[in-house]
Amino acid sequence: MGRLTIPRVSIGLPVYNGENFLEDCLCSVLTQTHDAFELVISDNASDDGTAEICKAFAGRDDRIRYVRQERNSGAAANFNEVFRLCRGEYFKWMAHDDLLQPTWLERCVEALDASGPEVSVAYTAVSHLREEEGTLLPYDAEFPWGAPTPAGRLSQMLVMDGVSILTKCYPVFGVMRREVLAGTRLIQPFNASDKVLLVELALRGDFVQVPEYLFHRRLHANNSLTANPTPQDVLKWFDPDANRPATVHKDLWDGYRNAVREASLPSDQARSCRRIVRRWAWKLRKRLAGDVLRGAGLR
């Protein structure tokens, strides 16, 4: 596929100091049976061997476009930048330490094509690749799904948070309709903003899961959350320029309210969604109060 051809699918790979697993990741992407894609890599000014690996792969495959940022702007900005650099009708984010089975992209594209515009995200079942033990285990924490309305989907996501799709946020790495994703706030610069993005997407369309274990999430000591053990560390990972306390639940509350307000919902659905968010906030009122005090410098 030439550079001037607009691809059906874009894969965006944001990376910072990813030399440890990057080659395996790239090989898993480039051996997809659905090969009509572009792979755009946004390197957040890595200071390890990431650039050399990316340039070597790009020199061998014209589907790859490598862009190096001048500075490390944080995970949120880099995820969003790589999306803006992509051109395809469908889009997928790829983490440098994850792996795809060869038919992953084919199955997800088939699922989106078959489902029609009422579905915004397609993804597959997930296995955990535990680096230390060298084991591959299915992640079988299923979630309730299938509500026909935005309010129904929001309720399933928020009421069941902890055992629902929001726990691991894996559908963020599914295949999405670009036009739907472009209507969201993308990845925002605060902890767990991927949860907010999934809510935004669910308010705009359903999700479909391909029941095959084709996505391997690698668990290792340098995973983003493992390497950033405190909420403040995670906030700095999302945004190195953040100059405020981490207020996780307050940020989620604001994010969910904004998601409902900006989703262009019918009035009855909007009212129902606002009630669902209020119930979620009431359940977590003590944590929210703590965040408000923390944000004001009183805790």
Image (cartoon, rainbow, N blue to C red):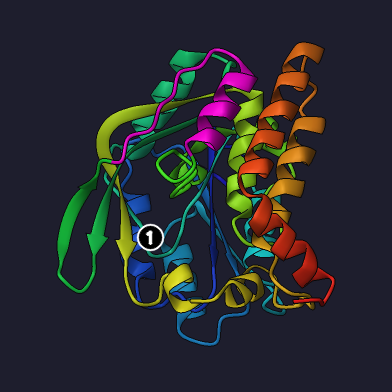
Name the residue furthest front: 286
For residue 82, above or below residue 215? below
Pick the front one: 21 or 163: 163
Residue bearing mark 1: 26
Residue that appears at 47% across and 53% down = 94
Residue 90 shows in this picture: yes
Q: Amino acid at mark 1?
A: Leu
- Write down the region rendered in magenta: 141-160
Residue 18 appears left or right of 47: left
Image label count: 1
Task: Name the residue located 68 percent from the left edge and 50 percent from the top edge.
Answer: 285
Q: Indicate left or right for 48 with 22 as reference.
A: right
Quadrant housing the C terminus: bottom right
Secondary element under disc 1, as helix, strand or loop, is helix
> Dividing the picture into quarters, in which one does residue 104 lie?
top left
In terms of depth relative to the viewer, which is nearer, 113 or 148? 148
In reply to whether residue 144 is colored magenta, the answer given is yes
Q: Residue at x 67, y 42 (%)?
A: 282
As drawn, 83 above or below 65:
above
Q: What x and y, as percent, mark residue 105?
A: 38, 37
Is residue 4 at all visible to an observer of this figure?
Answer: no
Task: Report x, y in % for residue 16.
Answer: 54, 74
Q: Can you tell which quarter of the image residue 40 is in?
A: bottom right
Say whether residue 186 is magenta: no
Residue furthest to the bottom in view is 47
